[in-house]
Image: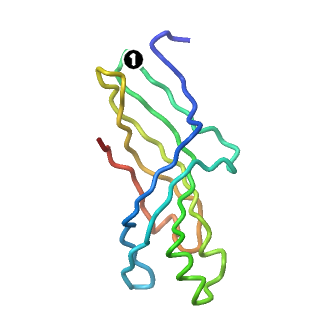
Amino acid sequence: MDSNLVPFSVTRLQASVPDGLPLEWQGKAFNSGALNIMLDDRSGSCSCGVLDYAQKRASAEFHVRLEFPEFARMLEAVEIPQELTQPVCAVLNSKGEILDNHSFFLSGSCILQEHGLFPSRETRASVLPGH
């Protein structure tokens, strides 16, 4: 293996968006309420990546589960079928520059698994670089 390449596994990921995200469903705008993001350990796939120090680039694939507990509770209250309130599973393919201090900020697009409420052909998700 090339000594400039450092493979890694992602073993923990927990993020939240307390203010939620804007959603449109059946022509109506909603706020999702808090959004929770975690590794999808149930997928059986590895969330892993590679640091390429020769190119100063990092890349990773994350298998994630997105939960909207407040929005799900609201839908359950109006007796929406349970399969529509389940978490959304996705694969995030991300890349970013390795900085001089060895940190990196990753960004990329998500490939969503089919979900009754968020059809993959109509739903887009991505992660923008942060600081």
Tell me which colouring the rendered structure shows: rainbow
Kindly state the secondary structure of the residue where label 1 is placed: loop
Query: Looking at the image, which residue is at 62% across and 88% down?
Result: 79
Residue 95 position, x and y percent, is 40, 36
Q: Is residue 86 above or below residue 74?
A: above
| Amino acid type, mark 1 | Tyr
Query: In the current view of this chain or complex, which residue is farthest to the top?
Result: 3
Q: Is residue 10 above or below residue 77?
A: above
Residue 59 position, x and y percent, is 44, 32
Query: Looking at the image, which residue is at 70% across and 44% down?
Result: 44
Residue identifier under label 1: 53
Query: Looking at the image, which residue is at 60% across and 83% down?
Result: 76
Residue 90 position, x and y percent, is 55, 54
Q: Nearer the viewer, residue 65 or 69?
A: 69
Locate residue 18: give its quadrant: bottom left
Q: Is residue 15 above or below residue 61?
A: below
Query: In the current view of this chain or complex, which residue is farthest to the front?
Result: 18
